[in-house]
Image (cartoon, rainbow, N blue to C red):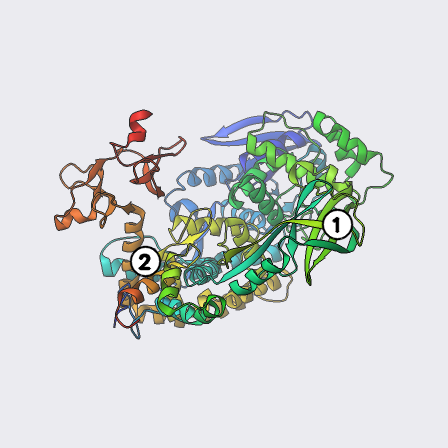
């Protein structure tokens, strides 16, 4: 199986790098929700434009925004 | 009687010969291109001959570079094992010839593990087995007085336990470095058919792991929003910034509530806390601290600082810089050094302040080195005009030396608590009451006083401005060459002599780039692969364990053969695993090399088509370099621009402010780099054609 984002070897839909970034996105959503009552989609948009967000995180956020049923 | 004195470098040999010759004028001779000196002392002829650093190296007995694992190694002349060491053969021949007429052998190389090891191999292999009878000069500076004293009190033998530890280090580095690097290079070459030098090693692997761990944290970082309260108060007609009691507020609603409750109100001073504290002088420089300070002040890489310090040592301006010591033993005549430095106008007044003290006691650190004291100025003044970097580093070392004898600095901090409607704000002030040691180190410390007007508890103040500001948490900082060196020191991997070089290798191999060490795809993949197939070779514990064993050899607690055997036993299954998975490893490495090389050529988005990337290409017809769009191959975009055909071109990583096309960095050897816009029709270029 290959990663949906970068094509590297993957056990599930993402490679280990993007999987780690995805977990980080999921984990931090709670903090954002507590801080400013934000929807998942808006959160992904905010993260993908934030200058401090990591490159893999941005790639995952962009992928999720572009895919159906994120 | 004729004695052969073996030195580490030509400049050291010249200085030693001059110091030991009774008239200070040794005869300079040459065998081919190899210089040597004839000096006379106490009726004895001294032949002072330099090496060129190591003349011998450890190499596998099997010469074929495509074979691994290899565990049989031998010492061979460097020119037989390394392509860029052709002059070494001539050097060995000259030393060999000079050794034939000598009755006595004296080793005068640097007194440390490398100096001892290189001397040992020359005495053994080039001088025909004279290592057991050789005597040793031990010195920490190349000043005439210390060299003469050292010659008058020669050590009876060279330092064999240190040499055994040195040989062990060379063998271990070769066994690990050569085998692991070959395994990766061969795997990639067999898969792609292209050669690319890949390397890892006993210390290089764990060091790269520190960098990739940090890179992963940064790449997976999700910032979290927070809010800050900004406020200003007016006192005696002056405006001061005040801090809210909580540095960060977690929700926007709470931040808005705080602002609402404080805006336009008057605050009351609840408490004025004044604290005085003494700040001790800094400790003398060891090599690591000198490298870190030079990086923070002048942005010199650790390698550059080590090279400059080495030159200052060879000019007898400073003591031996490769030291872990933070101590200045009493045997060093501090007063004589200060008296000598007083001859330099800029140090005159400072030296006199210290010389007026009844006693001079340095503030020393914990770092200890049995071979050398901390880095200190010898008191000699430069005999030639120093280059700017040399002058800066020498000044830093002189001022640090003076500062360690200074009195503690006395500082005052003030914290004023201002209450407003149940909230507390802090107003902070600070000032230096007594300068102490800072007087000597002044250009290198920045202290800005914040002086508050007289304030009393119960006094009211006017809040001029209260607002909230949104911020985001930031990812951890990338390592730079200096913080990476510190991490290596803290983890106890590598030595003071090798750390800077290892950091440089990571850059040369393309694993890392930029001042803020950004790890490349290749660097990430090398560590990914090593973590999967042989995690032990990138483990800090594993490397540290070997370092401890080498220290024990030096102290007589361990045998070299046992350490080597243990290391080979650990490495053998690792190499087997790499060999079994060669195909997969080769595929992954080749892909990473391709991506890294591609990234080096990618300049940025194409502003014409909006979807392609501008990339540095080479014409198949003419072989010339140019910039083209990746969409050209799909028949969508024909954007292209010419490029200079000489020099190194790298993406500048930013777009032109005038036209939005990517910028490119151009570097010709010996010239300053130039950054320009790739667009030959850029309006900026038309206005200013240069």
Q: Secondary structure at mark 2?
A: helix
Residue indicated by mark 2: B185
Residue at far right of view: B358
Relative placement, left or right, of B609 versus B319 is left
Task: Give whichever of A35, B43 is nearer the camera.
Answer: A35
List x then y, in percent, for residue B214: 47, 60
Tag in front: 2 or 1: 1
Task: Give whichever of B383, B58 is nearer the camera.
Answer: B383
Label whose residue precedes the other's in the sequence (2 or 1):
2
Residue at far front of view: B264
Q: Quadrant of residue B526?
A: bottom left
Relative placement, left or right, of B628 versus B291 is left
List x then y, in percent, for residue B324: 64, 51
List x then y, in percent, for residue B207: 48, 58
- Chain where mark 2 sits: B
- Per the model, the C-alpha gap separating discs 2 and 1 is 58 Å
- Chain where mark 1 sits: B
Q: Is there one chain holding both mark 2 and mark 1?
A: yes
Q: Secondary structure at mark 1?
A: strand
List x then y, in percent, for residue B479: 50, 53
Q: Is residue A62 above or below residue B239?
A: below
Quarter of the image for the C terminus of chain B: give it: top left
Please indicate, yes or no, whether residue B376 appears anywhere in the rendered image.
Answer: no
Please indicate, yes or no, whether residue B386 appears anywhere in the rendered image.
Answer: yes
Measuring 27% from the left and 53% from the top, which residue is drawn there?
Answer: B195
Measuring 47% from the left and 41% from the top, which residue is drawn there?
Answer: B92
Residue indicated by mark 1: B413
Task: Give whichever of B466, B294 is nearer the camera.
Answer: B466
Relative placement, left or right, of B99 versus B602 is right
């Amino acid at each position: 199986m290959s990663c949906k984002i970068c094509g590297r070897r993957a056990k599930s839909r993402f490679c280990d790098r993007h999987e780690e970034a995805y977990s980080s996105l999921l984990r931090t959503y709670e903090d954002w929700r507590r801080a400013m009552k934000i929807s998942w989609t808006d959160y992904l948009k905010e993260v993908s434009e934030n200058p401090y967000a990591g490159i893999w995180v941005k790639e995952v956020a962009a992928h999720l925004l572009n895919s159906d049923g994120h | 009687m004729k004695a052969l004195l073996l030195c580490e470098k030509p400049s050291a040999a010249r200085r030693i010969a001059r110091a030991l010759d009774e008239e200070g004028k040794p005869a300079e001779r040459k065998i081919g291109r190899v210089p040597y000196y004839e000096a006379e002392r106490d009726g004895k002829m001294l032949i002072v001959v330099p090496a060129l650093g190591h003349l011998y190296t450890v190499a596998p007995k099997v010469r074929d570079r495509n074979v691994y694992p290899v565990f049989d190694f031998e010492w061979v002349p460097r020119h037989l094992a390394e392509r860029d060491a052709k002059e070494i053969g001539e050097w060995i021949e000259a030393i060999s010839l000079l050794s034939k007429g000598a009755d006595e052998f004296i080793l005068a190389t640097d007194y440390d593990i490398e100096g001892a090891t290189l001397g040992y191999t020359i005495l053994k292999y080039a001088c025909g087995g004279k290592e057991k009878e050789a005597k040793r000069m031990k010195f920490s500076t190349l000043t005439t007085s210390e060299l003469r004293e050292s010659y008058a009190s020669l050590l009876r033998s060279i330092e064999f336990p240190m040499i055994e530890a040195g040989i062990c280090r060379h063998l271990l580095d070769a066994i690990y470095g050569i085998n692991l690097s070959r395994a990766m290079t061969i795997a990639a070459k067999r898969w792609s058919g292209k050669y690319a030098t890949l390397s890892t090693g006993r210390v290089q692997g764990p060091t790269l792991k520190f960098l990739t761990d940090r890179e992963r944290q940064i790449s997976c970082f999700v910032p979290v929003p927070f809010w800050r309260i900004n406020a200003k108060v007016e006192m005696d007609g002056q405006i001061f910034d005040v801090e809210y009691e909580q540095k960060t507020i977690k929700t926007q609603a709470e931040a808005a509530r705080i602002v609402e409750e404080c805006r336009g109100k008057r605050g009351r001073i609840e408490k004025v806390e004044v604290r005085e504290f003494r700040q001790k002088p800094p400790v003398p420089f060891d090599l690591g601290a000198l490298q870190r300070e030079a990086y923070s002040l002048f942005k010199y890489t650790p390698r550059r600082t080590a090279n400059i310090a080495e030159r200052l040592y060879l000019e007898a301006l400073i003591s031996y810089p490769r030291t872990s010591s933070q101590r200045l033993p009493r045997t060093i005549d501090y007063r004589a050094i200060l008296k000598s430095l007083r001859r330099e106008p800029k140090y005159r007044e400072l030296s006199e302040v210290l010389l007026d003290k009844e006693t001079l006691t340095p503030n020393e650190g914990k770092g200890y080195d049995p071979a050398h004291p901390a880095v200190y100025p010898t008191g000699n003044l430069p005999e030639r005009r120093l280059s700017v970097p040399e002058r800066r580093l020498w000044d830093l070392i002189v001022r640090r030396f003076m500062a360690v004898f200074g009195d503690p600095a006395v500082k005052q901090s003030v914290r004023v608590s201002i209450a407003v409607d149940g909230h507390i704000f802090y107003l902070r002030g600070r000032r230096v009451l007594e300068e102490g040691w800072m007087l000597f180190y002044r250009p290198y410390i920045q202290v800005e006083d914040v002086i508050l007007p007289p304030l009393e508890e119960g006094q009211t103040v006017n809040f001029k401005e209260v607002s909230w500001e949104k911020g985001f948490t930031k990812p951890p900082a990338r390592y730079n060459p200096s913080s990476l060196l510190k991490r290596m020191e803290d983890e106890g991997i590598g030595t003071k002599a090798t750390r800077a070089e290892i950091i440089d290798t990571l850059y040369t191999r393309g694993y890392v780039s930029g001042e803020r060490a950004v790890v490349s795809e290749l660097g990430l993949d090398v560590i990914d692969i090593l973590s999967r197939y042989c995690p032990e070779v990138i483990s800090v514990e594993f490397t540290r364990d070997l370092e401890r064993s080498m220290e024990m050899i030096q102290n007589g607690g361990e045998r070299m053969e046992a350490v080597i055997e243990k290391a080979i036993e650990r490495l053998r299954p690792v190499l087997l695993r790499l060999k079994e998975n060669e195909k997969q490893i080769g595929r992954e490495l080749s892909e990473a090399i391709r991506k890294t090389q591609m990234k080096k050529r990618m300049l940025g988005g194409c502003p014409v088509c909006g979807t392609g990337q501008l990339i540095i290409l080479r014409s198949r017809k003419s072989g010339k370099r140019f910039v083209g769009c990746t969409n050209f191959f799909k028949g969508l975009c024909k954007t292209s621009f010419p490029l200079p055909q000489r020099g190194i071109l790298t993406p500048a990583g930013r777009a032109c402010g005038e036209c939005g096309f990517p910028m490119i960095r151009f570097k010709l050897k010996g010239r300053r780099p130039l950054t320009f816009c790739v667009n030959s029709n850029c309006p900026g270029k038309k206005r200013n054609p240069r």
